[in-house]
Amino acid sequence: MDKKSFIQKKNINIITIRIVDELEIQKLNFTYRRQNKPTNILSFSFNKFITTNHKLLGDLVLCKNIIEKESLKYNKLLESHWAHITIHGTLHLLGYDHKNTQETDIMEKIENKMMLSLNYKKPYCLKN
């Protein structure tokens, strides 16, 4: 994308991504979710305009070691799993969740569609 077309975009969404170790993500998970265990990703939604056309959606904190372990455990390509977890976290920043079956189905369908659009396999096998 050239500078001119970048500047002409009406709204630019910004996400901060931080990659951490298991100890740090466990501390964050306990502090913000009261779960004393490491996790693959945490999403912290901000969703505020910081300038007229720049919106800070929020922060994604990813744990490299957990993502690598999951990729082996679930027999997924590492690059594909990184893409999936990043998409999953970004959807949380956009307001999607998976607290019930209906929300889960909606979110998983979007994740599958986005992964396919990036030429990766579907991360979920859905009925339908």
Image (cartoon, rainbow, N blue to C red):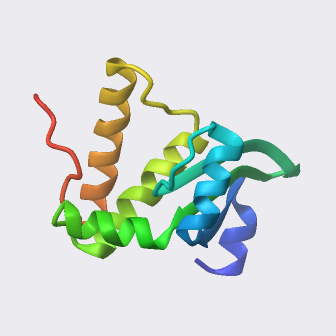
Q: Residue 120, located in which quarter of the rendered image?
A: bottom left
Residue at 80%, 52% (x, y): give it.
Answer: 53
Q: Is residue 77 left or right of residue 18?
A: left
Up the image or down, 75 lies above or below 92; here it is below
Q: Nearer the viewer, residue 1 or 112?
A: 112
Quadrant where the N terminus is found in the figure: bottom right
Outermost residue toward the front in this view: 36
In the rendered view, tell whether residue 109 sits above or below residue 115: above
Side of 45 relative to 22 (left or right): right
Residue at image location 71% in from the left, 45% down from the top: 31
Image location of residue 99, percent across then percent down: 44, 24
Q: Residue at x 63, y 80 (%)?
A: 2
Observer-nearest residue: 117 or 38? Answer: 38
Q: Nearer the viewer, residue 99 or 112?
A: 99
Q: Assign the C terminus to one quadrant of the image.
A: top left
- Residue lying furthest left in this view? 128
Q: From the top left corner, tell me how far across and down residue 77 is, in percent.
A: 22, 72
Judge from the rendering whether residue 95 lies leftward or rightward of residue 28; answer left or right: left
Left or right for 54, reference 24: right
In the rendered view, tell whether residue 123 sits above or below residue 125: below
* Quarter of the image where one finds residue 125: top left
Residue sitting at x 28%, y 47%: 113
